[in-house]
Image (cartoon, grey):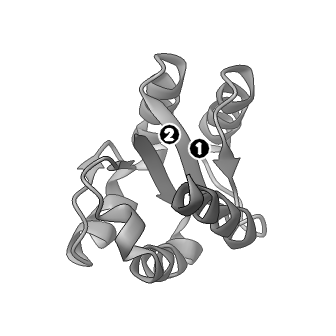
Amino acid sequence: MEIAIIAHDGKKAEMVQFLNEHQAVFHQKEITLISTGTTGKKVKKAGFDVLRMLSGPLGGDAQIAARVAEGKCKMVIFFRDPLEKHPHEPDVLMLMRLCDVHDVPLATNLASAELFINALKTS
């Protein structure tokens, strides 16, 4: 199962902490992590295998959206910072829209991400 992990700058530490708290899930060989560039760099430094795309503002969100549309990416965990402006907001909205179009689960905060991971643990 391919899972995309993305975090705005103000949420990157929270993403790494979330992954560390759920290492047992994310280190399974059945799970493949993909990520935007900068998030992926921090995640890789924390000891996780991750396929890094471009940085979000440089097209990484769009690359992940394409993988959603192609049926490759089966879940997206995107810790968004709703209080900041982001120059790549159109790409973020496209990613969210494609998750809806293709019925791909999308967690945009810690609470929904926890629900998704707990569901993976019980399946």
> Residue, x 64% and y 33% (percent of image)?
104
10 or 31: nearer the eye? 31
Mark 2: few, some, or many residues within 10 Å (few <14, many ≥20)?
A: many
In this rendering, would 8 be left or right of 89?
Answer: left
Is tag 2's residue or tag 1's residue first in the polypeptide sequence?
2
Mark 1: few, some, or many residues within 10 Å (few <14, many ≥20)?
A: some
> Residue, x 52% and y 70% (percent of image)?
9
In this rendering, would 58 be left or right of 50?
Answer: right
* Residue 52 higher or lower than 96, as above or below: below
* Residue 36 higher or lower than 11, as above or below: above
Where is residue 19 shown, x and y percent of the image?
Answer: 43, 73
In this rendering, would 76 be left or right of 102?
Answer: left
Q: Quadrant of residue 83?
A: bottom right
Q: Are marks 2 and 1 in contact (CB under 8 Å)?
A: yes
Q: Mark 2 sits on what residue? A: 61
Which residue extends farthest front?
122
Q: Give, as a three-letter code, the residue at label 1.
A: His
* Residue 80 higher or lower than 75, as above or below: below
Q: Quadrant of residue 2?
A: top left
Where is residue 109 shown, x and y percent of the image?
Answer: 70, 65
Where is residue 3 shown, x and y percent of the image?
Answer: 45, 46
